[in-house]
Amino acid sequence: MIDLSLAIRNLLRNRRRSFATFFALALGTAAILLFGGYRKNIEYTMHTAYVRDGGHLQIQHRDLFLYGSGNPTKYSIAGYEAIISAISRDEVLGKMVTVITPTLQFGGIASNFSAGVSRTVVGLGIVASDRNNMRTWNEFGLPRASPHFALDGAAADAAIVGTGVARVLLLCESLNIDNCPKPEEEQPASGAALPTDIAQLAAREAPRAKAAGGARIELLASSSGGAPNVVSLAIVNAERQGFKELDEIYLMLQLPQAQRLIYGRTSPKVTAIMVQIKHSGQIDEAKERLVGLLEAQARGQSLAVLDFRELNPFFVQTVQLFDTIFGFIFALIASIVLFTVGNTMSTAVMERTVEIGTIRAMGLRRRGVQRLFVVEGMLLGVAGTVSGAVFAILSSALINQMGLTWLPPGSGERLPLLMLVWGETPTIAGTTIGLILIAALSAWLPARRASRMVIVDALRHV
Amino acid sequence: MMDPGRVMNIRARILASLLWVAAVAQAAPDAQRILAASDAVRNPGRPFSVTVALTEFQDGKRVDSSSMVTYSRTLAQDAQFASLVRFIAPARDTGKLMLKNGQDLWFFDPSTKASVRLSPQQRLLGQASNGDVVTVNLARDYRAGLAAEEDIQDGERKTRRAYKLELDAATDDATYSRIELWVGTENSWPLKGRFFADSGRLLKTVYYRRFASELGTERPTELVIIDGLNPGSVTVMRLSDYASKNIPSSWFQRDYLPRFQPE
């Protein structure tokens, strides 16, 4: 106890220096914690976005993920209704699961023939009401729920495209998309004219005028056998996708419509079954149970269960990137703390050489001298880091109140900018205790030097 | 020795029954047989080669043209045609080959010696999609039903009497789920075809016209293909220089593509 009060009194002897060290420590702690809060915000935001979009687990054909991107319908799941009902009947999974929904992914060509443009797209057939339920998943309590899904309750021929698809198909005006200048007019073809008798034949075949209104496109696709098929779709909305590459191929439509397009004459299939569970922590348990269930349910098909981290390497990479940056910042600030505290304590040792000689002459052991300085350093560390943590928590609360928004990597919509400091106990405790230990360590080296002084030399020190 | 009166009687009976069969045939012509006959008009029954000139029009203006020699024959394993297409114009495409064998479509570029399989999706647009209305045995993949006998305007704007056949896909290989085909009543000429997708949308309309004597019978030498989705797009296909040729079936192997030498 006497050590503690002596340490406080010694620290207060040179207030300006102690305060500068304290301030450096507090600032360093706050910086680490605020950045940690930002890192958590990114992780939770992306986690939530991916789970809302694709569920936690997807049942797919074993080869779809690696080989299916060019021809997804080749790797489809037959009898998917039976698998879905088996999952929801299962007593363990039934309690964990929030949504089980089939999807069909396929390649096609979207055309706006009235404007004479077309492009290849990746179509996704989905069950809109299930998707809407998936969008309400919010385990991390993020403030803004995803907007209502435009396909839910829309007509059977409704579809959503990426803004890039809408732009390429010249639908900007009818879908009210900003930042979409008109492309340069193409030179009209200057070739020879169509012979009149053929022109008359073609005119006879001109289809009756379509019911105007809204943005309509034709979607061409082919079955795996090669038979072409086409449906007409009404674009109800254009949603911005995070990546330009995805934004320019994205097309989402109702599952029955997609199945009619791809499987027309044969029985409908899907390419994946998405499973969303209540708590992300149960993901491995659910996966194990699903694999067992599939072995019993779908004997003839080689199906695999993939979790969203395997399906979205970008998520894992982003989290790893931020973990690395966090580690880097921590190491940087820890070394600054090491030198600041070490410097302060070295100066203190130098200044108090005569004092050290005196108390040693009075009979205090080397260990006692060491303890005096280490406790001083630790005290600085505790005061600095704890107030830094308090500052970080208060300022993060203030920032969260300000309602700032930002565009997270790979996201199409602006999301609230949050600093998730409060509640991340492991980060707070780890940072604080780590910096206190580093402060104690950096005090220990000068303290050791102080304790090894020769008493006579120390007493004579000027 | 048979009683001559009885012989006469039998003859009369046979004649009568023959007449009766003919009469029935007249009343309800066999749709499948009409289809097979029109197939025979479009495609010779033996291996042949033909020069195809393609001209593509968009909104009334010519946008592209090319020409190619097609070698076709039916293969032993099924009654369907396999075709090898060699481009002869424009210059940038000269020598390129396209092989259609069953559901597979291969593209070969002699400058890189690479053969690439075109996926069904890659055939949805452009000229690759027009191949499947030309050299194809409709009778094999489709079940025909007689819908009507009516007067239509043919590709030369003449009114002709025609059987309207409704063709429904009979095999999984069939490219179209439904085809309406008008075949002339007097000579089994195919006059007009409308090709539909599964969803019921019209994909293309084809007029067969300019019939001329080629390889022993009157055959269409010009096809006008009107895109059903984009009626501004019209392709005119002129067929000339029909020649009967002894084409070995080895030509229709993918491995043969790099070794192919046109005579």
Image (tube, coloured by chain):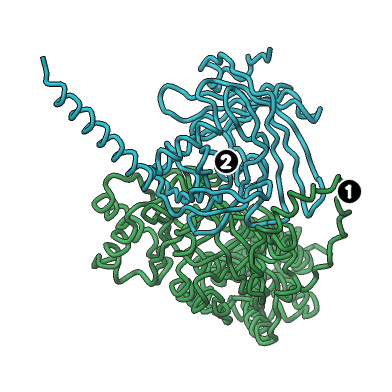
Chain colours: A green, B cyan
Observer-nearest residue: A406 or B132?
B132
**In screen coordinates, is A274 left or right of A376?**
left
Q: Looking at the rendering, in which quadrant would you find the C terminus of chain A?
A: bottom right
Q: Which residue is mark 2?
A: B133
Observer-nearest residue: B210 or A348?
B210
How far apart, in angstroms, are the residues tagged by discs 2 and 1? 28 Å
**In screen coordinates, is A421 left or right of A226?**
right
Q: Looking at the rendering, in which quadrant would you find the N terminus of chain A?
A: bottom right
Q: Position of residue A176 (x, y in %)?
A: 73, 76
Observer-nearest residue: B141 or B193?
B193
Q: Residue B90 sits in which quadrant?
A: top right
Residue that appears at 36% across and 47% down = B28
Where residue A275 is drawn, which disc sits there? none
**In screen coordinates, is A104 left or right of B229?**
left
| Residue type beneath disc 1 | Ser
Observer-nearest residue: A191 or A142?
A191
Residue that appears at 63% across and 35% down = B220
Q: Is residue A53 visible?
A: yes
Where residue A190 is drawn, which disc sits there? 1
Q: Is residue A32 visible?
A: no
Q: Position of residue B104 (x, y in %)?
A: 52, 33
Q: Position of residue B249 (x, y in %)?
A: 51, 17
Please tell me whether mark 2 sits on a helix, a strand or a loop. Answer: helix
Circle 2 crowding by C-alpha within 10 Å: few under 14, some 14–19, many from 20: some
Subunit bearing disc 2:
B
Q: Position of residue B171 (x, y in %)?
A: 39, 42
- Is A299 rendered above or below residue A243? above
Subunit bearing disc 1:
A
| Residue type beneath disc 2 | Val
